[in-house]
Image (tube, helix red, strand yellow):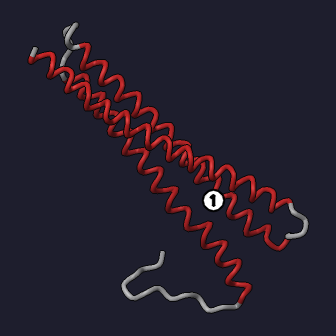
Amino acid sequence: MEHALEHIAAAVTPAVMVSACGLIALGLDNQVARMSGRLRDLAREFRDEDAPSRRAVVARQVRVMELRHRLYSRAILLDYAALFAFVVTSLLWLAQAFVSLSAAVPVVTFGVGVLLLAGMAIYVMASITLARRTVRAEAADILGRGGEAPVREPAGVRAH
């Protein structure tokens, strides 16, 4: 009985990671959908003949948004791959009760899942960093025309 409980406990740990991957996937899917909507809005604005002066700014934003969309899409694929690795890990832990299997095999699949999540996090961080480009482009377009002085950062805060 004690041996069976160890197998169940070992199988539950990846299940928690599966749940975490599901929550992450929801957030990433929302980001991808939001960016898709924003890209459609920017495309509409680019085609608007009443605002030809904004075309250069909009084109820059579209380039950055397309790259961010690509990064988030890759991130969500890595998240789902990690989810799959954690499900396989659970199955392998449970299979050890029925077949002779090295304990290293499920540990390796769990490690693969963790590495996939690390890759996903890198893509997300890269996309977040790129988000500043679109904000800077919009701010430069608006503040550049208004002729107002730039806002100074508080002491100790570094602008990027």
Residue at figure coordinates x 37%, y 28% from the top left: 85
Give the answer, above or below, for where 84 lies relative to 30. Answer: above
Give the answer, above or below, for where 126 lies relative to 26. Answer: below
Q: Where is residue 2 in the image (x, y as percent from the top left)?
A: 9, 18
**How many neighbours does mark 1 have within 10 angstroms: few (below 14), some (14-19), or many (20 or more)?**
some
The quarter of the picture where residue 139 lies is bottom right
Q: Residue furthest left?
A: 2
Q: Where is residue 65 in the image (x, y as percent from the top left)?
A: 64, 56
Left or right relative to 2: residue 141: right
Residue at figure coordinates x 50%, y 47% from the top left: 27
Q: Position of residue 101 (x, y in %)?
A: 21, 13
Q: Position of residue 90 (x, y in %)?
A: 30, 23
Pick whichever, 53 or 95, lies toward us: 95
The quarter of the picture where residue 140 lies is bottom right
Give the answer, above or below, for where 23 lies relative to 158. Answer: above
According to the picture, the residue beneath numbered tag 1 turns out to be 64
Residue at figure coordinates x 14%, y 22% from the top left: 6
